[in-house]
Amino acid sequence: MTIVDMTELPNRRALAMALEEIAACKPKTIGVDVVFEGLKEYDELGDSMIWSVAHAQPKTVFSYKLIN
């Protein structure tokens, strides 16, 4: 198991890029647990990148919480 601290990533696009790097290592499972603080600008590319990683890695589990 490897834990990656993504606290300092500025947006969803950066999160997606980090997930792509992790997925490239071919792990058996990727678990993502994040807390989003406040609303951010919609980032279509970031969202699509996250979903592409999730579909490429069949065992991806997301857990998230939005704090306003």
Image: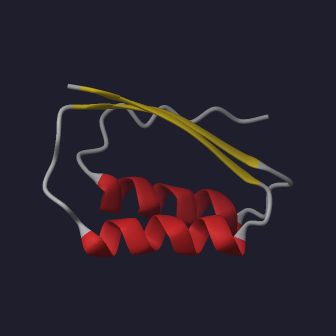
Give the total of numbered labels.
0
Q: Where is residue 26 in the image (x, y as percent from the top left)?
A: 79, 64
Residue under the point 48% across and 31% down:
5
Rendered view: 32 above or below 58: above
Q: Position of residue 6 (x, y in %)?
A: 43, 37
The colour scheme used here is secondary structure
Pick the residue in front: 58 or 17: 58
Q: Where is residue 25 in the image (x, y as percent from the top left)?
A: 73, 62
Q: Is residue 43 left or right of residue 58?
A: left
Q: Is residue 6 left or right of residue 41?
A: right
Residue under the point 26% across and 51% down:
11
Can you tell which quarter of the image residue 20 is in?
bottom right
Rendered view: 28 above or below 1: below
Image quarter (top left, top right, bottom left or bottom right) of the C terminus: top left
Q: Where is residue 24 in the image (x, y as percent from the top left)?
A: 67, 68
Can you tell which quarter of the image residue 57 is in?
bottom right
Rendered view: 12 above or below 35: below
User: Residue most toward the top?
Assistant: 67
Residue under the point 41% across and 53% down:
15
Residue under the point 38% across and 66% down:
47
Rendered view: 21 above or below 33: below
User: Residue most toward the left?
Assistant: 41
